[in-house]
Amino acid sequence: MFNYEQLLEQAQSWNVFVYEEDTKGTTKGLYVDSHILIDKKMSMIEKSCILAEELGHHHTTFGNISNQNKLPNKKQELRAREWGYNLLFPLERLIEAQKEGIRNRFELAEYLNVTEQFLEDALKRYKEKYGLYKQVGKHTICFEPLGVIENFEEVMPK
């Protein structure tokens, strides 16, 4: 999928400007009016995960949502994170990972080029959204326990 350099190129194509600085404190990324600040102390994989979410803010949020005590702001934050999950970890990648012989979550995070925390957060969100499983073509993706089942025939959506 995307590595950090490719995400930077994608951001540029969307007229989003990305800056790396030492962001003292706990802030890893921040989006404001087509400008993204990324903490330069992170690894390239961490930067990719944070940049994907911040690009999600560019595409899905509006206004100042920094106060996460407000429900509409929480919803916008979740929407931006989900956008980032879909960018770096679309469900079809689980099917590819199984075909490649990936055996555990550590290997899966490495295969996807994301942090283990990003992977866990994405899987949690997918489970909240779809339930215990999701049909993707002729495959059933199970979120608990994590796995992919290949069906003999493609199941047609209702």
Image: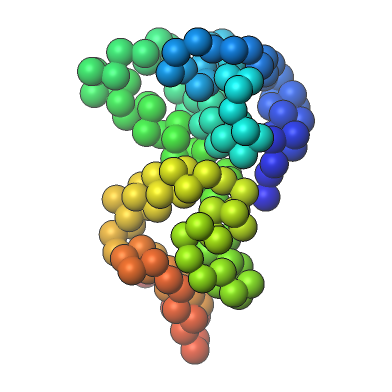
Left or right relative to 121: residue 106: right
List x then y, in percent, for residue 102: 56, 69
Which residue occupies the foreground of this view, 98 or 139?
A: 98
Residue nearer the viewer, 108 or 25: 25
Quadrant of the rendered image containing residue 108: bottom right
Classify residue 97 by image quadrant: bottom right
Q: Is residue 62 above or below residue 104?
A: above
Of 144 and 79, the residue lying toward us: 144
Q: Is residue 135 above or below residue 45?
A: below
> Can see residue 48?
no
User: Up-down: is 151 above or below 13?
Assistant: below
**Residue positioned 31% across, 65% down in the render:** 144
Residue at 36 percent across and 63 percent down: it is 143
Q: Quadrant of residue 142?
A: bottom left
Instruction: From the viewer's perspective, tell me whether residue 36 is left or right of residue 136.
Output: right
Say which quadrant the C terminus sits in.
Answer: bottom left
> What colour scheme was applied to this rendering of the protein?
rainbow
Residue 111 in sight from this viewpoint: yes
